Image (spheres, helix red, strand yellow):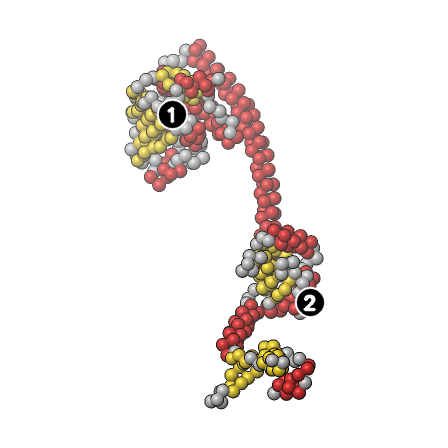
Amino acid sequence: MQYREKYFNNPEDGLVVRGMELYARKENGEVFPVEVSLDHHKLDNEKLAVAPIMDTSGHVCDREIVTDREYWLKSMADNAPVMIWGAGPNGECTYLNKTWLTFTGRSLEEELGTGWEESVYPNDLPRTAAFYSKVLENREPFTIQYRLKRHDGKYRWVQDTGNPIYTPEGEFAGYVGYCIDIHDQQITQEKLENLIWHRTKKLHKVLRREKEMNALKSRFVSMASHELRTPLSIALSSLMLVEQYGSWEKDERVVKHMKRIKISINSISTILDDFLSLDKLEQGKIEEELEAFDLLNFMYEVIEEVKLLKKKRQHIYLSHKGDRKVIMDRKKLHYIMKNLLSNAIKYSPEDADIELNFENNDNDISIMVRDHGIGIPEDEQKYMFNIFFRAKNTQGISGIGLGLTIVNQYVGLMKGNINFTSKEGDGTTFNIKLPQYSYEEYTHHCG
């Protein structure tokens, strides 16, 4: 009423009202919101007042919905268990939720803009600021970790994650992000990394020491083998001279003792060979040496070498099938066959037969050695290729448990495979399969 009266009393003032929110009353007495405007208008030189009135009931309802939604979103953000922030296109902070302010103990006014940087640990600030500037320039999502001062003055590690936001028109509008306290995890990780560093340093020290010990062991094995082999060679040569010039052939007791001496010398020589072979295997000094040779003659030579070890009425029966000419590593095969035949003799009783068979299948060679000796206990068969392992039923029989370990590694180096079947008291059968090299591969290998 006051506007209308003022307008009519002083129309020359030209009072104009736009969108004034008032309340009107319907005929039934119901009150409803309206939007009133007041303007002047001239018609036929007569001044008129025009006052449009618009029912805004629906608009008020929409505004209330928007207000309620904004309140709900703000309440949700303030009560979120993470620190939520927002930034404008220039990167300056425009919003921080209650959780952030509670964490830092600072006011919203203190934190807005670039004020939040005052809570960042001084040593972390240059790195954090440079990183933030770079991702802002490229408008990239990011995750960064830095220390933030808590309300009690203590710095805590936080992980800050931000994502760029855009207007419906596609214009860059800034960032929205959140921080979580990862201090406990970070400290645990640092302790773990420190522990790993110290353990790794200690391990390197142990490995260096082990390497030195291995080098020392290798020198000792090489020196000891050389020093022992010389007197053994002299003893064996002297024994051969005694056999050649002696007159005791008919004395069975002397013959028996001479044989025992030979076997003992050969046994020590074998042990020395085993240690040297094992040392070379451990150092990776074993190379492939291919040769073309007659496999049948080769087998007869090995049988002749182990003949001295045979017990009374023991026989080795050799059979073969296929071409006798082969190309493979003769030295490794010699060790393998000598060890398997020696074991077959050693672990078989008198009068026992030993079977040796090989078959040339062009692409590979199959070799079988079967004895009828003491066999291997079933529960110990899985350990047969382990270093220094000896089955419980071998007590009283010489050996140190190196031979089969070396045999297994040699077969592997020759790209073959070895397996066995055994029954305690009924003997053991070893089967080996080795690849056969072609003549072209052999000539290429020889250069």
**Residue 110's mark?**
2
Locate residue 394, reporting x and y percent.
38, 34
Assign a secondary structure to mark 2. Answer: helix
Mark 2: give few (<14), some (14-19) or many (20+) Cα within 10 Å: few
In percent of the image, x 67 and y 55: which residue is there? 129
Tell me the quarter of the picture where residue 100 sits.
bottom right
Q: Mark 1 points at which residue?
A: 435
Query: Is 124 above or below relative to 109?
Result: above
Work out whether residue 207 can be spotted: yes
Front one among 344 and 131: 131
Q: What residue type is labelled 2?
A: Glu
In percent of the image, x 38 and y 25: which residue is there? 435
Locate residue 442, reporting x and y percent.
43, 19
The answer to whether 367 appears left or right of 238 in the picture is left
Q: Which amino acid does label 1 sit on?
A: Pro
Front one among 45 and 288: 45
Between disc 2 and disc 1, whose residue precedes?
2
Query: Is 268 above or below relative to 297?
Result: below
Assign a secondary structure to mark 1. Answer: strand
Locate residue 214, reporting x and y percent.
56, 33
Locate residue 306, reporting x and y percent.
38, 21
